[in-house]
Amino acid sequence: MLVTNLPFELGETLAGTDTDGNLINADKLGLIYEVPANDYSGTTPKKRRTGKTLKVICLRNLSGARLYGKRLARLNKTAGYKLVESTDGYTTTLADGPAVVIDEFLSTVGVASNDIFWGVLEGPVLVRTPLAGATFNATGIAVGDSLVAATGSTTGATSSGRIGGYALANATDAAGAHNQSRYAIGFALSARTSGETNADLLIHATVQF
């Protein structure tokens, strides 16, 4: 459902700790809203970019460092609900993930460690290209190309959290890789061994159509 009354606006962050350093506002984490695809950097009323909407999720920055807008944030792969409530830093490897785009409207100070921000799950959003041409994984990016996280260095590096093209080992793998990506059901929030058959598994569904 389209909403306009978010707990805090795009372009803003929410305090993640109190004056004693205790984590706060945990009740906001994981909230997902569908909002107008406006230019939230402007003054009120916000200019509409397109009739399309943005689906955004409320996340805590658990990277231990400041993160910046238009970069890809890797979701925190800890069993339980942290994977849908927090990020542990930028994406660093090819097709790293699960990941979201950090709110492009954040100021130049970004989001501090432990503070809360909006990650974009779906909709038109600005991202950053790689610092080096080699990590584009192609001669360039064309309209309609499929995109993944590009290779960076370490999670806090300037080269990380960037977007790139697909890089397939050979043509034989192309169709299978494409279908596995396109028809992905979601990602795991818990773990099972191959011997744990016919068992429940907690996941986060990301079916797209």
Image: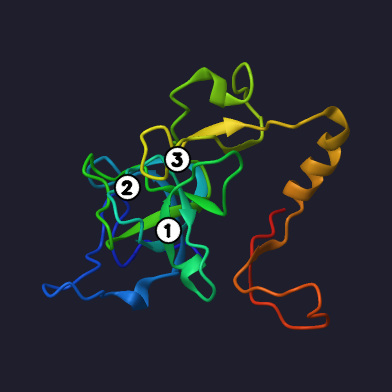
* Kind of element beneath mark 2: loop
Quarter of the view holding residue 21 = bottom left
> At numbered mark 1, what does the secondary structure look like: helix, strand or loop?
strand
Q: Amino acid at mark 2?
A: Leu
Q: Please state the horizontal and vertical placement of residue 22, each as a whole percent of the image.
A: 21, 76
Is 96 displayed left or right of 49 in the figure?
right
33 displayed left or right of 9? right
Color encoding of the figure: rainbow
Q: Dot 3: what SS?
A: loop
Return the x and y of residue 131 as percentages of the image width and height: 43, 24
Distance between the alpha carbons at the discs numbered 1 and 3: 12 Å
Return the residue nearer the eye: 192 or 50: 192
Pointer 2 with pointer 1, Cβ within 8 A: yes
**Inter-mark Cα distance, 2 to 1:** 10 Å
Q: Mark 1 = which residue? A: 87
Residue identifier under label 2: 67
